[in-house]
């Protein structure tokens, strides 16, 4: 049985995972097959697994899986495997990076008449994002009713209330920049924060629907420009959908090529170290590699309006 099951797993997995012939799995699984993720606790049927494989293969079309070992003990078995592939298309909200990844896992299976009835796996498709250096924010992605309950009486606040709440927060105004080939890209962002000084870490949150998002995601570095009180026109430009936002903008390149805007109150270039997925946004954690500061006073933003920080009255 050892040799038969070994060869069946190798043959079926090569057909399903390497060539996309997911119907081959039906020869190896029972009709009531169930697959359980050890990490998330979620389960899926055979049809759901087949759909998952199609999605993975669409994003990693050259996916290749090697069955490293199969250990059988009666009606149970453990399968150890390695997969490699190149990220060529959108996957779980992540634009293609062109990176080649390798991921490993193991499956513990329970068999019935030589076919797999239940499979507990140490891996799910989000592990491919981990191999790309991308992580999920677990709390932000938790299903309703899970995690810490802050107020069991009110539920989630109305989106309009949240918008009003956010408008009350006073921030600076930044333009986050990068390059796509030789083309400079950028967008206006107010979700910026310093994470630490030692080491010098900063973070920005970028909406996935932004036209600049794919270029940012594929970059190794980005620029963060704190706009001055003389750059209100620059804000309008980078908040727009203009095809070439840099057409009338003066800028210079940071040491690693990120566009730094002339006339900014301050600017830095940072290396992207972590990318955390948070549903509609990605949080970029970056290590600062270069910084510039000028005498220009920064612009201030609150409740949809811009202010000159030089005119603020001290308390």
Image (cartoon, rainbow, N blue to C red):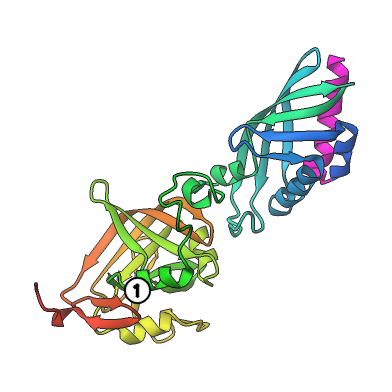
| Residue 23 location, quadrant | top right
Q: Considering depth in this image, is 187 or 77 the residue closer to the camera?
A: 77
Residue 219 visible in this rendered orientation of the protein: no
Look at the picture and state if 168 lies above or below 236: above
Q: How far across and down, in percent of the image, does residue 282 sit?
A: 48, 58
Q: Considering depth in this image, is 92 or 225 the residue closer to the camera?
A: 92
Total numbered labels: 1
Taking the spot 66% from the left edge, 40% from the top edge, the residue there is: 84
Taking the spot 25% from the left edge, 85% from the top edge, the residue there is: 230
| Residue 228 location, quadrant | bottom left
111 drawn magenta: no
Q: Residues within 10 Å of mark 1 (few under 14, many from 20)?
A: some
Q: How far across and down, in percent of the image, does residue 101 sit?
A: 60, 43
Q: Residue furthest top?
A: 74
Q: Seen in the image, is 310 located left or right of residue 286?
A: left
Q: Seen in the image, is 73 located left or right of residue 245?
A: right
| Residue 40 location, quadrant | top right
- Chain part drawn in magenta: 1-20
Which is the main secondary structure of the residues drawn in magenta? helix
Residue 256 visible in this rendered orientation of the protein: yes
Q: How far across and down, in percent of the image, does residue 119 sit?
A: 74, 29
Q: Residue furthest left?
A: 315
Secondary structure found at label 1 = helix
Q: In the rendered image, which residue does mark 1 sit on?
A: 167
């Amino acid at each position: 049985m050892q040799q038969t099951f070994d060869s069946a797993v190798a043959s079926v997995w090569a057909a399903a995972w390497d060539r996309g012939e997911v119907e081959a799995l039906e020869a190896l699984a029972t009709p009531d097959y169930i697959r359980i993720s050890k990490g998330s606790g979620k389960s899926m049927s055979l049809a759901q697994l087949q759909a998952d494989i199609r999605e993975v293969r669409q994003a990693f079309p050259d996916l290749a899986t090697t069955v490293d070992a199969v250990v059988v003990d009666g009606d149970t078995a453990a399968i150890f495997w390695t997969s490699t592939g190149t990220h060529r298309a959108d996957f779980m909200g992540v634009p293609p990076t062109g990176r080649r990844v390798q991921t490993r896992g193991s499956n513990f299976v329970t068999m019935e008449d030589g076919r797999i009835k239940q499979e507990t796996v140490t891996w799910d498709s989000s592990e491919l994002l981990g191999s790309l250096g991308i992580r999920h924010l677990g709390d932000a992605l938790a299903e309703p009713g899970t995690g810490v309950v802050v107020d069991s009486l009110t539920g989630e606040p109305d989106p309009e209330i949240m918008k009003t709440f956010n408008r009350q927060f006073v921030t600076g105004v930044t333009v986050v920049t990068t390059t796509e080939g030789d083309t400079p890209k950028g967008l206006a962002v107010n979700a910026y924060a310093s994470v630490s000084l030692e080491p010098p870490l900063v973070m920005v949150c970028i909406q996935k629907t932004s036209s600049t998002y794919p270029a940012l995601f594929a970059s190794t570095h980005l620029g963060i420009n704190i706009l001055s009180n003389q750059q209100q026109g620059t804000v309008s430009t980078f908040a727009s959908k203009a095809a070439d936002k840099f057409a009338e903008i003066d800028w210079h390149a940071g040491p690693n090529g990120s566009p730094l805007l002339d006339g900014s109150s301050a600017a830095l270039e940072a290396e992207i170290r972590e990318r955390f997925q948070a549903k509609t946004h990605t949080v970029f954690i970056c290590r600062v590699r270069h910084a510039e500061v000028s005498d220009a006073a920064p612009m201030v933003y609150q409740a949809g309006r811009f202010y000159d920080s030089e005119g603020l009255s001290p308390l």
